[in-house]
Each structure stands twice: as structure tokens, then as C-alpha cells.
Amino acid sequence: MAYPYTHEREVRVMSRGFGDPASRTVEGWRKLGGYAALEKALEMAPEDVVEEVKASGLRGRGGAGFPAGVKWSFMPRDKQGPHYMLVNADESEPGAFKDRELIRWTPHQVIEGALIAAHAIRAQDVYVYIRGEFFEPALILGRAIEEAYQKGLAGSNILGTGTDIDVTIHLGAGAYICGEETALMNSLEGRRGQPRVKPPFPAASGLFAAPTTINNVETVCSVPHIVTNGGAWYRQWGPEKSPGTKLFNMSGHVVRRGNFELPLGFPMDELIFDVCGGIRNGRKLKAVIPGGSSVPILTADEIQGLACDYESVAEAGSMLGTASMIVMDDQTNMVTQVRRMVEFYAHESCGQCTPCREGTGWLVSILRRIEAGQGTLEDVDTLLGVAKNVTGTTICVLSDSSAAPIVSWINKFPDDIDRLVGGRRAGAGTAAAGTAAAEA
Amino acid sequence: MTEPGRRVSYGKAVRGIEAGGPSARASRGPGRRLDPEVEQWLAGAGAAFPRSRSSLIPMLQSAQSGLGYLPGDAMTAIARHLVVSPVVVEGVASFYAQFRFHRPGRHRITVCTGTACYVRGSGKLLDDVQADLGIRSGETTADGAVSLESVSCFGACALAPVVVVDDEVLRQQTGEMVRKLVKDLVSGPPADGSRDEASPTIGRGVPG
Ligand SMILES: Cc1cc2nc3c(=O)[nH]c(=O)nc-3n(C[C@H](O)[C@H](O)[C@H](O)COP(=O)(O)O)c2cc1C
Ligand code: SF4
Ligand code: FES
């Protein structure tokens, strides 16, 4: 079934080829305007490409939203040894399913974007790190790379310009933490996928201790369009600080689930109630996880009129992250969902940091007790205490991620706590309680 | 802390190795013959890998896809090829969830229990499948027909709840559907690994 539904408010830039198997070939991708950007970029000086991407204001789509052009400008200009361009296709966060679609439908978009990025940072190698579960996307991308080599679009002397860039796929082996950039580098080097202490940052010392840039699949896919049309063109969408279009991955209890490409800043309530057709079975909205399972939960009230861009969602106390939204209706048992999310992080902890390794385990035990109806008000305080201790104390933010759903749930759904432990924390359910708990 | 110059005792097994005793030769000695199937893999696919540390994970993947799982000998073979200690290979292999150290069933069923699937009832689905097969996630049925696994998000959340059967992604599954599927699988031919393109598209507007 090819993409049967496109909402009229969508702006299809990256997703134009979705649903059409022809766009998986070089010919099909060229028909959509593909590889023109690569030709153009290879004629440009690397720093001019960086400037164009900087001008577009494109922000990283892998979660943190760091400006892509700025990241590229950290790479040394005088190349003294190898440079590496890494494409992060480890997409493993529950709720996220955009990179898989970009790779499956438009593999040449990924290749083209990665080659342009590699040229901009003077890398001679691109490694695409795809999670091991993505056997089909990896196969499709592998075929596309093969074809790109045959047609002189990758490898040595690309398009006769004298530029050499190799593209290689590396399959992950089932570890969520390998999506963290330095863990991914360790994994590529044949090690356990454990995050490294930063600094040094990848631009100084990344893969094999060489200057390295890493970007998410969707970031890379935005690049060819910016190079072709210019940074100013890209800014026609979205607010000043969050320009461009973004894939919104909608799942959970909405009527229409799937990927929708929309300008950043699109109102969240309209996204859920108009684009996605509202909540299924005529039920009411209870909660939204706006950016993959690692960000604080928002309530139905909080999403009213909320603009889906990095700043606005942060101001509302959560994060846009990957814009992977899990929508929950009023029948959702939140404690069960929160427990499941935290179990995930406990399971995926790489074990290097004590607060994360031990703390996530304790969080799960306490949540299970509360879920079974055997929790007390004191358990709720313990949860908040442990959550605080696993936040900001570790090498990477996986451990912070385990705390976010818990803290937001406890603060925003006091009725749940009431029902489960038969009591209410002092001041719970007020705006002040949220801050107090965060500082407690 | 040990005083300088003083020998440390690591226990029986290690003393055996130090002494070149029988346990050393039998388990890890450099000249030991490996399982013929492993030798065959190493001579074929395995030998093609460059002898560098970054070949480690691709070699583990190649061995697993050739042999179905990673017997101890496969890791020893990889260690020999890369000239590292077998402990290094085992340490890396055990970190990653996709590596299996036991022979899997002829078919593999993976239930997604990531949050987007969990809110759509995959917890109960997994319970149902476990009850049906009489095994827990991570186990294989006694007849060796089916291994059951769970994964936290398959990157196809719009199709929730997602079940993956022998590398084929199935959408919106129920306990009933999986039961029927298992029946057909067990009576049908073994997986041939050629169904990689059969997985459904994450369309816009998958019906809720
Ligand atoms: C625990 C953890 C998991 C992550 N997983 C991913 C992932 O699967 N894909 C991804 O692109 N970025 C992931 N990231 C973010 C990366 O570390 C990195 O910031 C990103 O790939 C940079 O790309 P961008 O600047 O284009 O967004 C993860 C970060 C953490 C802490
Ligand atoms: S926070 Fe957790 S996952 Fe991240 S490095 Fe520390 S132990 Fe590993
Ligand atoms: S949570 Fe099941 S596929 Fe994402």
C-alpha cells in the first residue's frame, strides 16, 4: 500500500518520493531533481557549502537540534589526516520511525546528502550506521549505493570532479545506546558501544581519533534541498530559530498514524486533531509524548496552541526531540506506560555510570510496586529522589531520559498517584509543584 | 595489591593454562581444531575480512548469519583471525542484543514492546503468544520450531502493534493472528530469508 493519504497542509520536501518505488533508483531520484545538488556542491568550495547550510538555519534532527552548519564549521580546515562523515541511522527510540522511511523510499536522498556533507567537511569516507533490525532498509540502501558507484556518483572521481568519497554501511547489532554519537563510534571501531567522555568532541577526535562529523539521517536528507534552492529558500518555513520542514512521526491512539512532513512551528493540537484526524473511537486525549519516549510528557491542556518547534516545546517543559509523538487517549494506564519506558532505559543502560546502571533498576522496581498497587506515598518521593540523582550526573543523557517520563507523570497526573497510592503529595497538581519537584 | 615479584594465583583453570596442562589445550590452546562447520565458515566468508579490530562486529554478524548463532568456536575463530584474545570477542558479542549464543528455532517471532506498540496492547499480545507457545520471550520451543523474542521499537510504530516473523514486518497484530501464523509456520517450510521486501509500508493514515 503506497502512501494513500497526504494531508493538504503537508509540505513535501524530503518525503516527495515516499510511496513510489521508482525513487529508489538513480533515474527516479534524478526525476525528482536528485543529484543536481551534489553536482552543484562539488563545484563549490567546502566552506561555501558550510555557509549555505549555516544560512538555512537547519538544525539537527537526531534529537538535540544543534545547528548543522555550525557543527560542520568545527571541522579543521587544513586536512592533515582522514576526516569521517557518519550518518546516524540507529533510530531506536520508541516512537521514532522517520529515518527508516527516508532510507526505504529515498535511499539516494540519504546518499546525496551524505556526500555533500562529506565534501563540506573534507571527508573521504561516509559510514552509515544502520541499526541491525533494519535489514530491509539496509538492503535497499545497499543496492542504491551499488548503483551510485556504477554511475560514478560515489567512489573515486565523483562526476568527474576529482573528488573521492567512499560510502559504507555498517549494521548495528541491537543496542539502543549505539545511537549516542560516541557510542556509535566505539561500535564502528569494533568495541562495546559505550559512550565516551566529552571533550574531546568528535570534530577534534572522533572515529579512530580523527576529526569526525555525525548527523542524523533526516538532517542529511534536508541538505540537498538547501544546496539546490539556497538557505534563504529553506527559511520560508518555520520560525526564525527553527526553520524548515520536519517529518512528524505520529503513533499511538490517533485516527491516522504515520509520517507527515510539515513546517516547524505547526500547532500541535491541529497536528493531532486535524492532520491525524483526532483520537480514535471518539475518545479524549490524555497525554502526548512529543519527541520520542525520552522526553517529558505533555497533558492535553498543555498542547493547546503549542507550536511544534524546538524553542516552544522546550518552553512548555518538554522537548521536540525527533518529533516522534506518541499520543495517548484517556483510557491509557499511565503507570504501566511509564514503567515500560523506564524498563527500556534500564535494559539499555550500557552500565558505565553507577547512577544510570543502578538508578534505572531501582526506578523500575519502585514503579512495578506502585503499578501492583503496593506503593506508598513515600515510594513516590523515593522515585523523585532517584530521578533527580540520575539526572545530569552521567556520561550521556540516557539516564536523564529514564527520569523524564517519571517526573512529568508524577507532577502532571496527581489523580493517578492518588488512585495508586491513596494520597496526594503536598501541593501536587499545581504549577508550583512541578518546579518544586524538579528542584527537590 | 600484590607485592612486586610475587606470583598471583588465579585459581585452578588459569594454573592449568600456565602449566600448559590438558584443560588449556582442550579449550583454548592455539592449535586446537575447531568445529568443522566453523572452520568452513572461517575459510570462506570469514577469511575475506581485513584483520583489523573494526572487522569484529561484521565478522560476528557474518558468523551468526552463516551458522545461525555464535557457538564458542566461532568466537575463537574470529579471535584467531583478528589476533586478539577470545575474551575480547566474547566481551563485544555479549554487549549486543542481537547476538545469540544458542541455536535458535527454525522460525523467529519478535514482538515489539516499545512504547508506541505498548500503548496499542503489545503487552497483552506478548502474554498471549507466550501462553500459546508455552515459552517465555528469549526461549525456543522444545521441538526447535519457534524462538520468541521481544524488541523495544522496531521503527515502524505507525503499524503498532508490530510483530516481526523471520524478518518480515507484520502490522497491527493480535494474539489470534499470531496463533494462526505460528500454526502455518510450523507446518510450512523453514524460513528462506528471501522475504526481505515483503514488509508493509508505513503509509500515511494507517487506520487507527
Ligand atoms: C541515548 C542516546 C541515543 C541516541 N540515539 C540516536 C539515534 O538513534 N539517532 C540519531 O540520529 N541520534 C541519536 N542520538 C543523538 C546523537 O548522539 C547525535 O546527537 C545525533 O546523531 C547528531 O545528529 P544531528 O546533529 O543531525 O541531530 C542519541 C543520543 C543519545 C544520548
Ligand atoms: S548514562 Fe547510562 S547509558 Fe549513558 S554512558 Fe552512563 S551508563 Fe552508559
Ligand atoms: S514501538 Fe513498536 S515499532 Fe516502535
Image (cartoon, coloured by chain):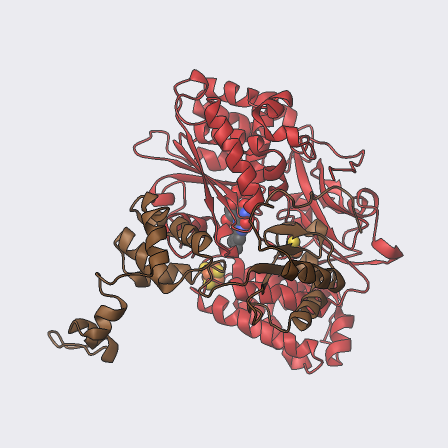
Chain colours: A red, B brown
In the rendered image, the residue lying farthest to the right is: A282
> x and y percent of residue A38 in the render?
52, 23
Give the side of residue A297 with respect to residue A76, left or right.
right
Q: Count the marks.
A: 0
> x and y percent of residue A196 in the render?
40, 54
Residue at the image position 52 percent from the left and 56 percent from the top: A176
Q: Quadrant of the N terminus of chain A?
A: top right
* Figure check: A159 above or below A432: above
* Figure check: A433 above or below A326: below
- Residue B11 visible in the displayed image: no
Camera-nearest residue between B196 and A147 = B196
Quadrant hosting residue A384:
bottom right
Give the side of residue A50 with respect to residue B150, left or right.
left
Residue at the image position 74 percent from the left and 37 percent from the top: A3
Residue at the image position 69 percent from the left and 56 percent from the top: B116
- Residue A373 visible in the displayed image: yes
* Figure check: A339 above or below A195: below
Q: Quadrant of the C terminus of chain A?
A: bottom right
Give the side of residue A235 with respect to residue A213, left or right.
right
> x and y percent of residue B109 in the render?
61, 60
Camera-nearest residue between B123 and B197 = B197
Quadrant hosting residue B160:
bottom right
The quadrant of the picture showing ligand 3 is bottom right
Camera-nearest residue between A175 and B14 = B14
> x and y percent of residue B193 in the render?
55, 48
